[in-house]
Image (spheres, helix red, strand yellow):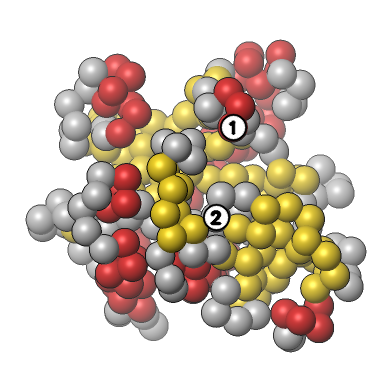
Amino acid sequence: MNFKDLVKEQLYEGKGKKIFSTTNPDLIIAEFKDDLTAFNAQKKGNEDGKGALNCQITSLLFELLEKNGIQTHFKECLDSNHILCQKVEIIPIEVVVRNVATGSLSKRLGIQDGLELPFVLVEFYYKNDTLNDPIITDEHCKILGITQNQDDLEFLKTQARKINSILKDFFIARKLRLIDFKLEFGKLNDGSIILADEISPDSCRFWDKDSDQKLDKDVFRQDLGNVKVAYEEVLKRILSQQN
């Protein structure tokens, strides 16, 4: 299918993607942008080709998860920057999965940076840029009206841990440590919840298994080098050892 033949109008533009309606009301198209943002868009940049890398990485990882029993909104990769997706109602929760302490967790709780956590930590953050995406509890989700169904929240946690198990094993075989990552989920018309958004170096932290070199958006956040080179290395390792 061709992007131009399917697209109708732009519905939304976020920090890393544009979302378009299509000729099929049940499908949308996500366009991956070259823009880079950090610290709730206080730091901004642009890296030519970054969007195409995230598009390909997301496509490959969603296909991997689908093969391992995780239902996602991904349908197909249309071209270098566009994927076709099932339309969902995004749940306004960022589900953050942490295997190693770093970033905001270390700052918030004073945990040593780089410390392997004793168990997989799953946190919820409220998707609200105005409030700087604050961390929230199950009870906060109910107060905010995100859901009154505890089963939905437990499902998010369970799926996040399943996804972590699949991806962690996949990446360690490619000499990458999956430090932490952000997931978003959406609801279908029947109320079922599926994985949405993207999985890429924009939303994950990857460290080289041997050197702990950072190969993700922290390269931009911390001015550690060339973002595109880091993302290309992640893609190269994903493509290695593929069956």
Image coordinates for residue 22, horizontal then vertical, percent? 83, 69
Quadrant location of the C terminus in the rendered image: bottom left
- Label whose residue precedes the other's in the sequence (1 or 2): 2
Q: Which residue is mark 2?
A: 16
Q: Quadrant of residue 106?
A: top left
Q: In the picture provided, is 207 more to the left or to the right than 8?
A: left
**For residue 193, above or below residue 102:** below
Image coordinates for residue 196, horizontal then vertical, percent? 63, 53
Q: Quadrant of residue 33?
A: bottom right
Mark 2 crowd level (few <14, some 14–19, many ≥20, 10 Å Cα): some
What label does residue 129 carry, if any? 1
- CB under 8 Å between discs 1 and 2: no
Residue situated in front as seen by the camera: 19 or 168: 19
Mark 1 crowd level (few <14, some 14–19, many ≥20, 10 Å Cα): few
Q: Residue furthest left?
A: 211
Q: Amino acid at mark 2?
A: Gly
